[in-house]
Every structure is written in C-alpha cells, then in structure tokens.
Image (cartoon, grey):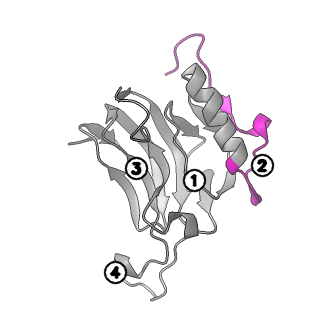
Amino acid sequence: VRQPGQGVINVRPLGARGNLIVDDSDAIEAAIGVAVSLGWPVYLPSGRYRVSRRFFPRSGIIGDGSSSTFIEVLDASPFADGRAILHIGYPRSESDQPLLRIPVRGFSIRGGGIRPARRSPDPATMLSNATGIFFDEMCHSITAVDVDAQFCLWGIYFGGQVGHLLGKQLT
C-alpha cells in the first residue's frame, strides 16, 4: 500500500520499450536514479525488458505480475562471475544504513542460461552463472511477493538478517 503523495517511477517515459528487441538498461538505470532520489519504487509495466547489466533498485521495484513483467538477460556474459541481475541493497562502499520495507514484487527474472544436458538436475550444467536477485545484508524486513527467477544458476539469494519470501519469514 502506497502512502498518500507517494508514487512510482515508470520506466516507459524514460525510454524503456519492454519489447525484448531494444536494450532497456539505460532507461531502467535512469528510472532507478530518479526513484532513489525520491524514495519511490521503479515501476515496470507489462513487457519483456532486455538488460545487459546489473541494477541496484534501492527504493524497490514493482511489475504487473510475474507472468506479465519480465526482466531478461539475453547475453549472460556480464554475469559470468555470479553477479546478480538485481542487487537489492548497496554497493559495499556507499552506505551503512539498512533498507527497510521496500517493495519488491510482480516480476520475473530470466537469466539467459540454458541447460545443455536435457533435464539435467545438476545446477553446474547451467550456461549462465547469474544470480537473479540478491538481497544483501543491508536489507531488513524486505518482502518479495510474486517474484520469480528462471534460467539463473542462483535464482533468489538472501544474504541479510530477516526477510520474507512468499509470506514465509527467512532468517
């Protein structure tokens, strides 16, 4: 629930297309910059957003649902070292203040990986080492709802103190 006077920063007016043809990274980065300065979450309307780098949406990120808003990596090479596509938290050098109760909901991340061995249960056979979403130790009381990560070596990784995923408390 948003407080009166608060809003979201929509990526579309900043140039995102959500058509999986154009790289939407610049528009998403611009939206995150504005959103962080206002303390509002970034909003991705329904679509398939092609990205080529990682993001730090510190004020939250909201889509229209995990079955209609997709953040997709088509070239997994920038994430070959296991870096997250979405890093919820801070780059280590920026702040020691925790993030409290930011919204993370309504989207799917597709990491660009494939399993070369059909139906292989071994995650090491993934051709993408990307982490879908990383909640770092600066996240406190974060709730992720209707969020999905596919084709990533690590889907959703929680490195913080306490959080919630699909209504279940993580410790």
Which residue is label 3 attached to? 134
Marker count (numbered): 4
What whole-number distance in Å separates the C-alpha atoms at marks 3 and 4? 23 Å
What whole-number distance in Å separates the C-alpha atoms at marks 3 and 1? 20 Å
Which residue is label 2 attached to? 17
In the image, what residue occupies the spot 54% across and 48% down? 107
Crowd around label 2: few <14 · some 14–19 · many ≥20 (10 Å):
some
> Residue 165 appears in which quarter of the rendering?
top left
What whole-number distance in Å separates the C-alpha atoms at marks 2 and 3? 25 Å
Which residue is label 1 attached to? 67
In the image, what residue occupies the spot 79% across and 42% down? 15
Magenta segment includes 12: yes
- Residue sitting farthest toward the bottom: 117
In the picture, the disc for residue 121 is 4
* Residue 139 seen in this snapshot: yes
What whole-number distance in Å separates the C-alpha atoms at marks 1 and 4? 24 Å
Dot 4 amino acid type: Pro
Q: Nearer the viewer, mark 1 or mark 4?
A: 4
Highlighted range, magenta: 1-25
Of the residues under marks 2 and 3, which one precedes in the sequence?
2
Mark 3 lies on a secondary structure that is: strand
> Residue 168 appears in which quarter of the rendering?
top left
The answer to whether 124 appears left or right of 112 in the picture is left
What whole-number distance in Å separates the C-alpha atoms at marks 2 and 4? 35 Å
